[in-house]
Amino acid sequence: MRLSPSLVNDVPLVPVVYVRILMRLMSQLGVSQQSLLSESGIHDALISDPEGHVSVNQLLSLFRSAERQSPVPCIGARYGALLDLSAHGLLAYSMLSQQRAGDLTRRAIQFLRIRVPLMEVELVPVGDGSVIRLHQRWPLEDMENFLVDCYLASMCRLSATMSKNASIQLQSDDPLRLKNLEEILGVNVEGGHSSNQLLISQCQGNQKNRLELGGVSDAEWNADQVTALIRHYIHCNPGRYCTLEHAAEKLGLTPRTLTRYLSTAGESFSQLRNAAREKFARHYLHETEFSIADIAEKLGYSDQASFTKAFRSWTGHSPGRVRKEQGLQAWQTGGSTRIA
């Protein structure tokens, strides 16, 4: 059964620590706690509970109040700049300095997506660095700019421990907003782009232009690198956008060139996609209560019949039979399937 966003928005999902950090910032700007919380439905007892959580609706209401009462511009970016590793509660904080920069970026994004599930964060490895791209997960309406600024500022703060070469690209072309963000975050901010994203490069000087172009030159790839990047892309996008054309565009290659690289590595896009979709399908059937129609949609199939045909070609069985056998096994062992 799929829950509608209106229902999920009222479920306590976000740790209350994010409320406390915003309260401290607003207090420094002369806004009282009572005034900030008056319309959010967040009470003092919840704020003092170290294990407390607030709902998406409560958090959005709080952000709306902060933006309305803030005496300074771009309060979302100022707030996000305070959300460092310790603020996100990363239990692996003490180990991060021992990891590679790319691993640090992935780990930080994983925690951010779980801790503050208001936007989808996509990591695209490109050349010497990464592009961290934001997508709306919830209907943000008037709070989109606040959340975009907040997420990018937090990721910019996190990336400062990994690389000194960072820049931001925004869909907005408001010159005042771009100027304010540059002053707050201390990085180059450009407007008028197709996505809201943070660019992180491990290289120096003009070499980072390869990231700003969204890809690298054909001569810099080899077949193994391309295959690894495509595996990652498919894993992050197993649904409707999992096409050869979309993947090639992400890497700045033509579909024909991408196909050639994969062929050199002994792979094909369809083989890699089928392997990933089979893995996701088995997970959904075994570990969740998503309907087969929902699973088909999540994996990019136009209807349940198309998904069933594909699944049968991979496994020799129908999805319904696999789920039925899983349910029987769980009943026999006294277990139960988990709901994702």
Image: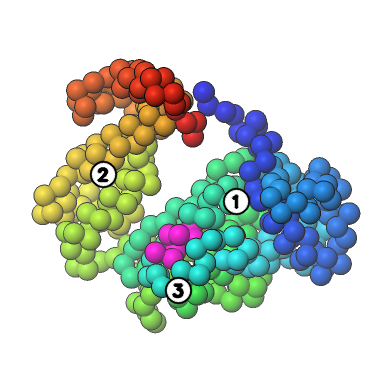
Is residue 295 one of those drawn in magenta? no
**At x 59% / y 47%, what residue is drawn?**
118
| Residue 229: percent from left, percent from top | 28, 56
| 2 or 1: mark nearer the eye | 1
Asked which secondary structure carries label 1, the reply is: loop
Asked which secondary structure carries label 3, the reply is: helix
Circle 2/circle 1 CB separation < 8 Å: no
Residue that badge 3 annotates:
97
Q: Nearer the viewer, residue 43 or 120?
A: 43
As measured in the structure, the alpha-carbon distance from the residue carrying label 3 to the one carrying label 1 is 23 Å
What amino acid type is highlighted by mark number 2? Leu
Res 10 → quadrant: top right
Asked which secondary structure carries label 2, the reply is: helix
Q: Is residue 276 visible?
A: yes
Q: Is residue 147 left or right of residue 229?
A: right
**At x 34% / y 36%, what residue is drawn?**
280
Majority secondary structure of magenta residues: helix
**At x 86% / y 48%, what residue is drawn?**
38
Circle 3/circle 1 CB separation < 8 Å: no
What's the magenta region? 103-109
Q: Classify 278 as above or below 37.
A: above
Question: Between disc 2 and disc 1, whose residue precedes?
Answer: 1
Circle 3/circle 2 CB separation < 8 Å: no
Residue that badge 2 annotates:
244
As measured in the structure, the alpha-carbon distance from the residue carrying label 3 to the one carrying label 2 is 36 Å
Is residue 104 one of those drawn in magenta? yes
| Residue 328: percent from left, percent from top | 36, 18
Residue that badge 1 annotates:
116
Question: Between disc 3 and disc 1, whose residue precedes?
Answer: 3
